[in-house]
Amino acid sequence: MSVPSGALRFNSDSGKLEYYNGEAWWQIDNFSADNATGGARGVFGGGTSPTNIIDHITISTTGNAIDFGDLINPTQSPGSCSSSTRGIFAGGNITPLTPSRTNTIQYITISSTGDAVDFGDLSVGKNSLSACSSSTRGIFAGGRNPTPATTFFNVIEYITISSTGNAQDFGDLSVGKQRLSACSSSTRGVFGGGSTTTPASTQFNTIEYITISSTGNAQDFGDLSVGKFNLSACSSSTRGVFGGGLDAAPTYLNTIEFITISSTGDAVDFGDLSIPNSGMGACSSSTRGVFGGGITPTPAPATRTNVIEYITILTQGNAIDFGDLTVGRNGAGGLSNGHGGL
């Protein structure tokens, strides 16, 4: 049966009232002039070799990314999350590399363009952390700092996105790890994969979750298909999607898999990226997931790509070409004003 434009419904999975715009359902608390026509904005910030570039796309369309502004410093592998108005980038490698990991948290106003502004600080400097958010809280988990001795963090910390200030302790992951990924619904944050090299090289298939509005340690959710790191994640309000990464070999992966965020259980096959890829930025609307950039093994040697591709989150299938980033890079943070946590 066709649904008329303007129809309302209550989504019992997300607990949100939704509005149908003729093409897709949109949560009322996300409704704005920008997304009323499905025009949620995706933003990619930073990347390798540390760059300060921020560029943006309109998720419901296809096409090349457009310049947005600059991060405070050239930054690789920050944790990134967002509300419907603000985008947050936290931590990362910064230039000059000595190596130097920053604890800086910075923010942008997603609906505009311009340079990032200082927000506050993480508890310590770290890179390769993961991040997710609800409409009010940003969550940062894991990460690594190689000096003075290599440390892999199990720390989870949080901020109130609408304010500014330093991150506060939330709880702990099951183990310290880096290069994990995260996604969220409005109530749950989910963390998947990751790696450590001490005391021995380990790639995790673990998925764990938190309740964003509370504090406490992460709990077991299920498993990814294999242990992997440098993967990327995005979500609708009900489904989390994990794409790409590296396994223990390490082999570059093109696999995409998904979970139902409100339940627990192992990830299920979704489809494939167009090419094996690691270290992509990822963002989403309520219907589309988008992966941008990364590093690919073909053609040899490994190449930083500018490719953007997308999936329809509620279906299954292979990723489709979207366009190009302004610059090829891996380790960019991805965020949007229409993701599943809002």
Image: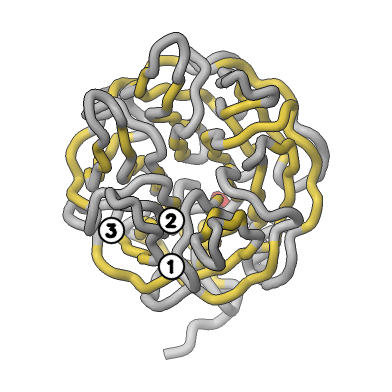
The foreground one among 213 and 316 is: 316
* 199 shown above or below 305: above
Give the image location of residue 289, x and y in percent: 50, 62
Q: Are marks 2 and 1 in contact (CB under 8 Å)?
A: yes
Question: How much space separates mark 3 and mark 1, taking CA atoms?
Answer: 11 Å
Tell me the residue that label 3 is attached to. Answer: 260
Tell me the residue that label 2 is attached to. Answer: 235
Q: Are marks 2 and 3 in contact (CB under 8 Å)?
A: no
Residue type marked 2: Ser
The crowd level at tag 1 (other Cα within 10 Å; few <14, some 14-19, many 20+) is many
Give the image location of residue 69, x and y in percent: 80, 41
The crowd level at tag 2 (other Cα within 10 Å; few <14, some 14-19, many 20+) is many
Q: Kindly state the secondary structure of the residue where label 3 is placed.
A: strand
Question: How much space separates mark 2 and mark 1, taking CA atoms?
Answer: 7 Å
Tell me the residue that label 1 is attached to. Answer: 313
The foreground one among 94 and 281 is: 94
Between discs 2 and 1, the one toward the N terminus = 2
Give the image location of residue 247, x and y in percent: 31, 52
Q: Residue 234 vs residue 53: left or right?
A: left
Q: Residue at x 38, y 61 (%)?
A: 253
Residue type marked 3: Thr
Any part of residue 214 in sight: yes
The foreground one among 195 and 303 is: 303
Q: Residue at x 28, y 58 (%)?
A: 260
